[in-house]
Image (cartoon, rainbow, N blue to C red):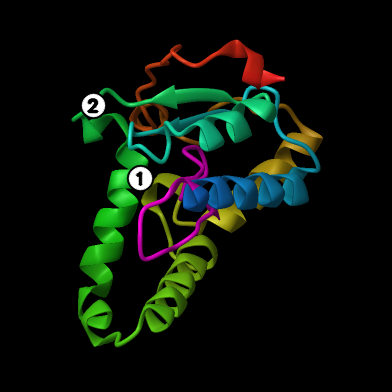
Amino acid sequence: MHKDCFGQMVYGYEMGETMEAKLVVGSFRLAVSAIKKLIKKLPADLLCHQDQGSQFTSYEYVEAVLKNNITLSYSTPGTPTENPGQESFFGRLKDESKDEFLEMETFKELKKLISRKISYYNNRRLHTSLNLRPPKKYMLNWLNEKKTKPYDGRERTKADRDDVCTIKKLNKFPKKIAK
């Protein structure tokens, strides 16, 4: 899953019965497409922060991210607190949906349910960190305000911005694939 730390919006996700690199590459491509649709181009200072799971450190994923001139960042192994947005999202999804998950009989049904949950999360679920607005509405409002005046950083509190994520860059990948 690719989720925005600032506006909390899920931009891309894929699901599969096994954890493979193609899922995170697909999720990343969906996120890039959604961001471009929303703001026409990728921001110059975009960062992709993940844990160090084998899917996210795979050559295919690293190449896809770097080819889009996006900074790649990883959490320290064994420290989920360095990726609080993802951990919080999945924790709440599991808590709020556990009974519904148990009712699913097929993977296809589960995919539909999770798609509905993510749509609800993006479009209707109110977030206290977003001044009681859903992520999509928050981002659209912020983008519209940004067009008319520079962002002054005051809408969200310092605690909200500090909570977003701790970044530790990992420079073990060859620069040649960043073309």
Which of 160/39 is in front? 39
As displayed, is residue 40 above or below residue 157?
Answer: below
Question: SS of the residue at dot 1?
Answer: helix
131 vs 163, left or right, is right
Q: Which residues, given as a range, are shown in magenta?
A: 1-21
Asked if residue 8 shows in the view, the reply is no
Q: Which residue type does callout 2 highlight?
A: Pro
Q: Please tell me whether residue 88 belongs to the stretch shown in magenta.
A: no
Q: Position of residue 117 (x, y in %)?
A: 42, 71
Residue of label 1: 86
Q: Residues within 10 Å of mark 1 (few under 14, many from 20)?
A: many
Task: Tell me which secondary structure the magenta stretch mostly adopts.
Answer: loop
Give the x, y percent position of residue 75. Answer: 32, 26
**Residue depicted at x 40% and y 83%:** 109
Question: Marks 1 and 2, Cα distance to the nearest angstrom?
Answer: 15 Å
Indicate the quadrant containing the C terminus: top left, top right, bottom left or bottom right: top right
Q: Along the horizontal axis of the image, is 153 left or right of 169? A: right
Q: Position of residue 3 (x, y in %)?
A: 48, 46
